[in-house]
Amino acid sequence: MELKEKQKKILDVAVELFKEKGYMGSSVRDLATKLNIKAASLYAHIRSKEEILEWICFGIAHEFFAQLQEIKNTNLPPKDKLNLFIDKHLSVVLENRDVTHIYSNEWKHLDGRLPEFIEMRKNYQLEVEQLLLEIYKAENWELKSPTFTTRFILHTLNNSYFWFKRNTESSVDIKEEIRDKILFGLLGNHE
């Protein structure tokens, strides 16, 4: 969905507010105050506070999917695809730390579109799981619990924003450290 300029401004301020107070702790009135407008004026640009949460959650989910599709369309060897997946997923997370925080913690409040969002997350997890299975099959390794392994990796990647304070380490260093930990855990000494 393409947002208008005013909606982008509302979204930016809402991200700050939801990060600070949580989705449930934030009101349309709080948002209007931060934007220095009347609450009723907001409804010319949004249907509801939940719509903003939809923009956040579905927006970053689409970004994750786009990166994954790009990786799947490459002709790289399986281990290189895994490296690229970790790098690209982490790039989205680290470039959108506050949005990722909201995506990871507030998605359950997507009342109207919650089933659709859950299905989307499930499909993403299945596609990542397929990528892992492809790697293990290509290397003739045994993956005892593909679902657990996939969930572990996604949880680790999605919550990596939490481990590092802004501007204390470079994103490149952070990505390399996380990637190395995940790859060693998955591949051990098979590098």
Image (spheres, rainbow, N blue to C red):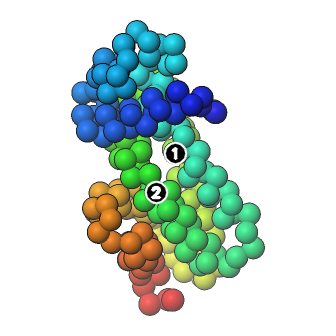
- For label 2, the SS is helix
- For label 1, the SS is helix
Q: Earlier in the sequence, mark 2 or mark 1?
A: 1
Residue nearest the viewer, comparing 151 with 22: 22
Q: Quadrant of the N terminus?
A: top right
Q: Amino acid at mark 1?
A: Ile
The nearer-to-camera label among 2 and 1 is: 2
Compared with 1, 127 (above or below) is: below
User: Residue 59's quadrant in the figure?
Assistant: top right
Residue 93: x, y in percent?
A: 44, 56
Residue 6: x, y in percent?
A: 52, 27
The residue positioned 60% from the left and 65% from the top of the image is 131
The residue positioned 47% from the left and 81% from the top of the image is 187
The residue positioned 40% from the left and 9% from the top of the image is 40
Q: Amino acid at mark 2?
A: Glu
Residue 18: x, y in percent?
A: 32, 35
Compared with 190, 155 (above or below) is: above
Compared with 191, 144 (above or below) is: above
Residue 50: x, y in percent?
A: 43, 23
User: Residue 22's quadrant in the figure?
Assistant: top left
Q: Which mark is residue 125?
A: none
Residue 4 appears in the figure: yes
Q: Mark 2 — residue?
A: 95
In this image, 150 relative to 166: left or right?
right
Number of residues whose C-alpha sits closer than 10 Å to that of mark 2, classed few (under 14), some (14–19) or many (20 or more): few
Q: Mark 1 — residue?
A: 60
Compared with 27, 116 (above or below) is: below
